[in-house]
Image (tube, rainbow, N blue to C red):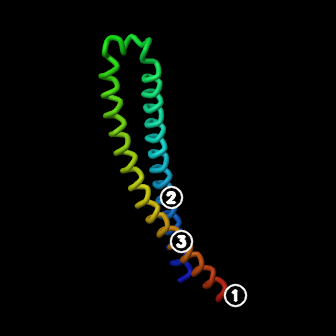
């Protein structure tokens, strides 16, 4: 019985570690999207500030770029919302895996205590 509990404990730890690793990946992905979004917003802000002397503005090319930037911001916002939703789902999975690992650890400790 103790060997089976030990093997099950190893399994729950592996699952917990995998779920936490996936959560970290999702959080890093979300951070990358947030960073891209912030940089693009800053570039838009800088472009608006430099309008008077910008050759792109004088030729009208900035309008195309502003259109692209706005569309890209919308895409990034969608990606960010999706990443946030996936991260929330993954948090629940990680909590469940963590709980299972903790419960099994406590059970193994109780069984070990009963043996002594």
Instruction: Say which of 29 and 72 sits in front.
Output: 72
What residue do we see at 61% from left, 85% from top?
111
Total marks placed: 3
The answer, for residue 11, to whether it is visible in the render is no
| Mark 2 element type | helix
Residue 45 position in % (x across, y down): 45, 28
Image position of 47 with respect to 5: above or below = above
Q: Residue at x 50, y 69 (%)?
A: 12
Q: How busy is the neighbourhood of tag 3: few (under 14 within 10 Å), some, or many (20 plus)?
A: many
Screen quadrant of the C terminus: bottom right
Task: Estimate the spatial distance between the alpha carbons at disc 2 and disc 3, rounded to whole Å.
Answer: 12 Å
Q: Which residue is mark 2?
A: 20
The mark found on residue 43 in the picture is none
Write down the residue under mark 3: 101
The crowding category of the residue bearing disc 1, from other C-alpha atoms within 10 Å (few below 14, some 14 to 19, many at least 20), is few
As drawn, the label of residue 116 is 1
Quadrant housing residue 92: bottom left
Q: Can you tell which of label 1 and label 3 is closer to the viewer?
A: 3
**Residue 53 x %, y %:** 44, 11
Specify the quadrant of the image occupied by residue 59: top left
């Amino acid at each position: 019985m103790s060997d089976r509990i030990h093997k099950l404990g190893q399994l729950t730890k592996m699952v917990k570690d995998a779920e936490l690793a996936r959560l970290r990946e999702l959080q890093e992905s979300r951070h990358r999207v947030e960073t891209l979004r912030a940089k693009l917003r800053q570039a838009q802000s800088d472009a608006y500030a430099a309008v008077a002397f910008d050759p792109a503005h004088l030729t009208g090319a900035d309008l195309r770029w502003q259109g692209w930037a706005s569309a890209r911001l919308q895409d990034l916002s969608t990606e960010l919302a999706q990443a946030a939703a996936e991260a929330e789902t993954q948090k629940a999975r990680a909590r469940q895996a963590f709980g299972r690992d903790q419960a099994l650890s406590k059970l193994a400790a109780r069984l070990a205590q009963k043996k002594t």
